[in-house]
Image (cartoon, helix red, strand yellow):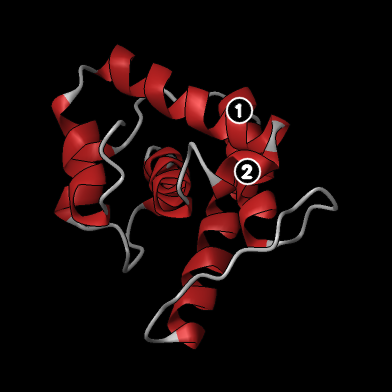
Amino acid sequence: MNNASAPYLLEGLAELSPAERHQAVSLVVLRVWETPQILLGDIPPAQALAAIAAVAAGLPGAQGRPWLDDRLRAAAVPGVTGELAGRALCALDVLVGRDRESVPLELHVSDGDAAGALLDDLRDVLMDGLRRGL
């Protein structure tokens, strides 16, 4: 996940083997959760969001969601564990400002309502996965 350009993030993940994808995504969500300031430098918010979405896409609750397109399906992390889903949820909370350690980010989107709905839906899928006791 070295290329932080949004159009290439998911393609880059899809090119990795399942084990490499799991490792890359795990590292990103762990680093965002443990060190939120990393979003201001080493890990751009778009990269963190792509990693979180790849985790959510690997959960059964993602099926039928409007954001689960072919590109995200190809980048999905297989065999998501409860630990990984929990870390992705914590990273999402950091990213959207729900965590007390969050850093002030300005995410520029053309449709704030749609972006908010997507973030809430990702959270719901991750929470559902945790409730199911992965």
Q: Which SS class for mark 1?
A: helix
Which label sits on residue 91?
A: 2
Whole-angstrom CA distance, mark 2 to mark 1, is 7 Å
Q: Nearer the viewer, residue 27 or 77?
A: 27
Left or right: 65 in relation to 7? right
Residue located beneath label 1 in the image: 30
The type of residue carrying mark 2 is Ala
Q: How many marks?
A: 2
44 up-or-down from 2: above or below = below
Where residue 82 is drawn, which disc sits there? none
Instruction: State the residue lying farthest toward the top.
Output: 19
Name the quadrant of the N terminus: top left
Is the residue 20 above or below the residue 103 in the image? above
State if disc 1 and disc 2 touch (CB < 8 Å). Answer: yes
Query: Which kind of residue does numbered mark 1 sit on?
Result: Leu
Snapshot quadrant of residue 3:
top left
State the residue at coordinates (37%, 41%).
54
Residue extending farthest to the right is 100
